Amino acid sequence: MTPVLDCLVIGGGPAGLTAAIYLGRFRRSVLSVDKGWSRAKWITLSHNLPGFPEGISGPDLLARMREQARRYGATLEHGTVEGLRRDADGLFLAKVGETEVAARTVLLAAGVVENNPPLPHVAEAVKSGLIRTCPICDGYEAIGKSIAVLGNGEHAAAEALFIRTFSEQVTLLMPASGDGGLSSATRAALLAADIATLPVVVGSVALDTSGVIAVGVADGITHRFDRVYSAFGIVPQSMLAVAAGAQVDATTRLFVDGHQETSIRGLFAAGDLVRGLNQIAVADGEAAIAATAIHNRLDRVLAHSTEPLSAAVPAQVPGVPRVKTLGVTPLGPFDRIEPDAATVIGT
Ligand SMILES: Cc1cc2nc3c(=O)[nH]c(=O)nc-3n(C[C@H](O)[C@H](O)[C@H](O)COP(=O)(O)OP(=O)(O)OC[C@H]3O[C@@H](n4cnc5c(N)ncnc54)[C@H](O)[C@@H]3O)c2cc1C
């Protein structure tokens, strides 16, 4: 078995990498294991990330964050954590291929997986911007455009109503038969907002380079839109925590307290898989909170010299004070927030 880590970070998207940067700068031993399917990889150009007025692509952002994490000594590895358990001493043991990784704390930052619409060439369509998934991210760029929202039920209707603040031409395309799973109150809200609802067969929705074409089942007419927002929902990747006994809500998103700690002591979570807004800025913020709580939870190490550390601290960081483990008793538990009153950051 490898030496015991201060923290194992599961995931290497914005949340996992922010935690790796913070923990590296706290001079904790931290390993991020990542499968490599960050949703940020799908971002052609993000315009809502603070600090990047000209926008930044997801792959560029991830590359910069990886460089920053490595600069402060974090280890980043490609791999999949297949199982997570605790031993009798309270250490977390994670199965990564044939290896077992031991860690005092774990940050789960495994994100969510998008339920893509069953349309051909979805990946290309998302990259070219024909299919969108996140109106909070890029609704601004849709101002005045003709927009279709493809999906069923209250979730899709809520998305259509949200997008209506950017454009007066919004149509809800509902693949379901019957009433599309909408309540009468929602139908009234859609009507009041002048949002058309149209039953479609998903197979009738086609994409070409200039737009989205859909044949309405009810009216038999071919409709053309500038873009379509897919509203098929997401699957939070909370399985490892659930298997370890952590509490989740009805959509399997993890409950956390004000320090991003799950209902399992020492197991923290940050980013899209936590209840909240699926946004990079939120993932970064949650990871910063979690990393600082983890640092405070672990044994304190006190600096006692200004000589640079040669082994434990990477050469790129000059003048970092030497540290010494004092074996101080870990801090007591933080004030806990009960799961049903857990932090809800957004919708
Ligand atoms: C098309 C698109 C456009 C977007 N545009 C924007 C935007 O403009 N602005 C914005 O703020 N947000 C945007 N987002 C959302 C943003 O990408 C996410 O909020 C962000 O990536 C969440 O970060 P995360 O670290 O929580 O999860 P992710 O970035 O998804 O990273 C999770 C990582 O964990 C890995 N993982 C999962 N399970 C395991 C395991 N068992 N072992 C090892 N690794 C594992 C995954 O493979 C993945 O690499 C967009 C999303 C999409 C899809």
Image (tube, rainbow, N blue to C red):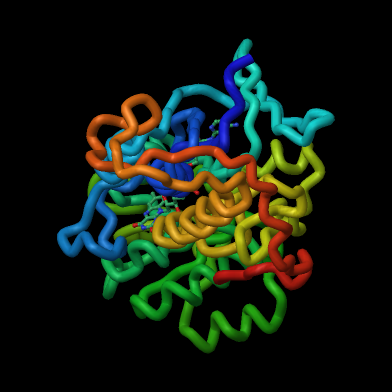
* Residue at the spot 32% in from the left edge and 68% down from the top edge: 146
Q: Which of 260 and 182 is in front in this view?
A: 260
Q: Looking at the rendering, in which quadrant would you find the N terminus?
A: top right
159 to 226, vertically: above or below: below
Q: Where is residue 192 in the image (x, y as percent from the top left)?
A: 53, 88
22 to 249, vertically: above or below: above
Residue found at the very far left of the displayed protein: 54
Residue found at the very far top of the displayed protein: 98
* Residue at the spot 46% in from the left edge and 44% down from the top edge: 23
Residue found at the very far bottom of the displayed protein: 192
* Residue at the spot 34% in from the left edge and 38% down from the top edge: 72
State left or right for residue 176 relative to residue 207. Answer: right
Residue 214 occupies quadrant = bottom left
Q: Position of residue 10 (x, y in %)?
A: 56, 36
* Residue at the spot 30% in from the left edge and 70% down from the top edge: 140
Q: Looking at the rendering, in which quadrant would you find the C terminus?
A: bottom right
Q: Where is residue 199 in the image (x, y as percent from the top left)?
A: 57, 61
105 to 332, vertically: above or below: above
